[in-house]
Amino acid sequence: MSEMRKVTLINGDGIGPEVVNATRQVLEAAKCPLEFEYQDAGAEQMNRHGTNLPPSTVESVLRNGVALKGPTATGIGVGPQSANVALRKQLELYASVRPVKSIPGVKTRYDNIDLVVVRENTEDLYAGIEHIVVPGVVESLKIITEKASTRICRYAFEHARAQKRKKVSAVHKANIMKLSDGLFLDCFRKVAREYSDIQSEDVIVDNLCMQLVKNPEKYDVLVMENLYGDIVSDLCAGLVGGLGLVPGANIGTSSAVFEAVHGTAPDIAGKGLANPTALLLSAVMMLQWLKEDVAAARIEKAVLKVYAEGKVRTGDLGGSARMKDFTQAVIAHLA
């Protein structure tokens, strides 16, 4: 057995504690060599800690180097900065990686989707740098740097090479934002010249959205700035059945946080109705990152078997199974 690895476990808000618990049960049933250290983050921590991201949580991830995180709530138009954004900034988790792949047994409008969205995670409009100029006028700053753009583009090509993928597409709006998106595109083209074995292209973001709906099979690895990445990754999730089925990772140079990319679903929180698939598949990504490839393959195979059989489905996919039923079905299929 591999050496025991300590993992920071962040419950989050809403259905977060439930899907985190279900995922932990599967990891333990698979006898993964993991020890869990529970920490807090999210809107529900404001009253307890006075912040949605306690310093102890950041320190834990820095110490352990890896975290598995449930969804956290963010106020719309009010409240503090998103805990997700703050965590990514403080830990310099510069690469958001979201594989989007069809699951056999889940019927959607598309078949055989298999692409990866690589999103720059530290700057751009999504970083939330804004202020009131005068009453009634707000300014948001779109910061794009050569350093961050080059780093994320190189990550995308390295990921493509490691996963034996054939093409990387840069997503931009350089026809309008000629300086900011122009810089990002220029960095992409310079990096692309270092990877002659991988095809490269660029596509304007609005055209990409149309093409993803018409011909998603045209794309392999997509790399883009932060805000575009947030929108496009959700669009891509819709191609395979929704956010409840798509995993996510935030990768830095010395640590990584793996998380479900869906919301907190407060309407079903505490009712045992949530679908833990997204976090389960995020845990698979975490195991792969930890080089626990055998355990990762076992859990992924078990999840896919449950869907292929079609007997146990949670309500979001038209079934009537409770979360504990789905969790137990996955455990039962661990080979």
Image: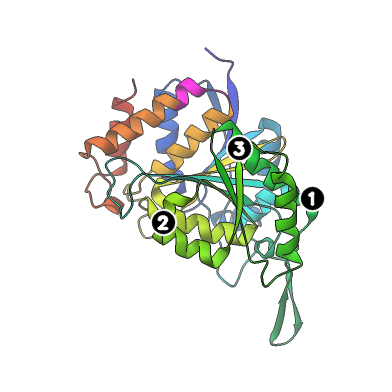
Relative image position of residue 202 (x, y in whole percent): 61, 56
Q: Quick check: 229 left or right of 283?
A: right
Query: What is the spatial separation of the Cα atoms under label 1 and label 3, in whole angstroms?
Result: 18 Å
Which residue does the numbered mark 1 point to in the structure image?
147
Q: Secondary structure at mark 2?
A: loop
Q: Nearer the viewer, residue 223 or 78?
A: 223
Q: Residue at x 53, y 37 (%)?
A: 165
Whichever of labels 1 and 3 marks the residue nearer the N terminus, that label is 1
Q: Amino acid at mark 1?
A: Lys
**Residue pointed to by mark 3:** 159
Q: Is residue 326 magenta?
A: no
Q: Secondary structure at mark 3?
A: helix
Alpha-carbon span between mark 1 and mark 2: 32 Å
Which residue is located at x 55 percent, y 25 percent? 35
Q: In the drawing, what numbered circle is on residue 215?
A: 2
The type of residue carrying mark 3 is His
Earlier residue among tags 2 and 3? 3
| Residue 312 x/y as whole percent | 23, 40
